[in-house]
Image (cartoon, grey):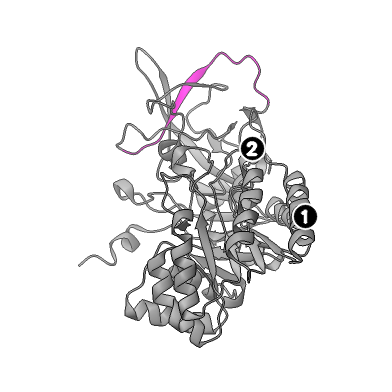
Amino acid sequence: MLGAAAVARAAQLYGTPVYLYDEGLILKRCEDCLNMPNAFGLTVRYAMKANSNRSILKLICSAGLQLDASSLNEVMRAHLAGIPYSSIMLTTQEVYSPPEMAKLEELLMQGLKYNVCSLRQLRFIADFATGNGLTPGIRVHPGIGTGESAARNTGDDYACFGVHRHDLEEAISCANKKGLKFGHVHEHIGSGGDPEVWRQNIDHELSIVEEYFPDARTVSFGGGLREARMPDERAADIKLLGSYAKARIEDFQKRTGRKLRVEIEPGTYIVANSGYAVTRVIDMKSTTRSHFIIIDGGMEINSRPLLYGSRHPFYVISEDGTRVKSSEFSLKDDSYRTVVAGKCCESGDCQTLAPEGHSMERAMAEPAVGDLLVVGGAGAYCSSMAPFNYNSHTQAPEALFTPGGELQLIRKRQTLEQILENEM
């Protein structure tokens, strides 16, 4: 934890709601990933969709990570932050129009790496790649997956990411006709899922590489490493997963003579628990069923409970920042229970939602109007994914807490004029 005083100082300097990130924890997570056991080399690509703030990208890349991008705009955004194209892999659902295709080809010639994710993408890129001696990657849809929720499972047959295994022979045939070789094979089975399924996917993917891709030099096991936001959750053991992958890669080398470099693409694991959404209690209400506290930042700063049924830890901090009234990491027998609701005109604007979708109470110390309610685990898929202009609310600012105890503003609060500036 950053400490109550630092949180209160951020609220005083930048107002609420405000996102606050712990720089030290981000760097520690980067170090943990770079130290993951490996056999013949490891590349760690940060999934920038988790949090794509320029300062966050620069910090993570300065620690030695490269980037995984999900759109052409993400690629260009990262480059504008000073990241070379050669450090970026584009894995996307996008299929480009001729002008966009020309831009992609331009960036590929400057070192951008590209994963083919459909037969149509393959047909569009094959001639250019062959003619310029490029060896793109291919994302394979394994037909199995796991995730924090159904919406975060990207590997089973309810999801459409990558070239499905039953289309691989057609993809290989198309590539062979064009003289195209795949140098990189990629699978991503979901975010925040079962580590055991992640481990099984290592074997599954290596069997596909051995059967279909004799020219592959790199294998990516994707991201989705489970992080523990709540006290009763357990994070993935990255050393254990790395050791398993290392052993399987070494077995592959003994069997085939091929040394494969490993890539992973963590997003949540790098930034989730570094981030806090600092809000203020602005009202209190009750019905015959529930108590409610109203905070000034709800679904427009953290939509994960509404989208996924996700749970986040709460910290109640006195308005002056002198004490933490309670957190779910220290909670024992507090009898006060309340729904944490936002200010949007939407019944789903609650940070405490039951799996069925209705609001539910959570135990905490009873706050007072004016106290700070801090939502933990808000570093990933919050600022980058929030519907922040709903009800014409403005996008919250973001700040970085440095290991030296300083606060740095890394995104200003949006103004109403900025919401309107593109309207005709």
Mark 2 — residue?
228
Secondary structure under badge 1?
A: helix
Give the SS element for disc 2: loop
Q: Main secondary structure of the magenta part?
A: loop
Quick one: 95 or 232, which is closer to the camera? 95
How far from the left and from the top, in percent, is residue 41? 76, 65
Residue that label 1 marks: 251
Residue 184 in picture, x, y percent from top left: 60, 67
Specify few, some or many for label 1: CA neighbours under 10 Å numbering under 14, 14-19, or 20 or more. some
Residue in the picture at 56% in, 85% down: 133
Q: In which quarter of the image is the C terminus?
A: bottom left
What residue span does the magenta drawing correspond to?
A: 330-344
Which residue is pictured at 63% across the width and 68% down the height?
A: 214
Front-lying residue, 142 or 10:
142
Magenta run includes residue 339: yes
Would you say the residues marked 1 and 2 are in contact, meaning their CB atoms lie under 8 Å apart? no
Q: Which amino acid type corresponds to the residue marked 2 in the rendered image? A: Ala
Figure quadrant of the N terminus: top right
Q: Distance between the residues labelled 1 and 2?
A: 31 Å
Q: Residue furthest bottom?
A: 131
Q: Residue at x 66, y 44 (%)?
A: 199
Q: In this view, does 123 lie to the left or right of 269?
A: left
Side (left or right) of 283 relative to 37: left
Instruction: Relative to 296, say whether 31 is above or below.
Output: below
Q: State the residue in front, 185 or 254.
A: 254
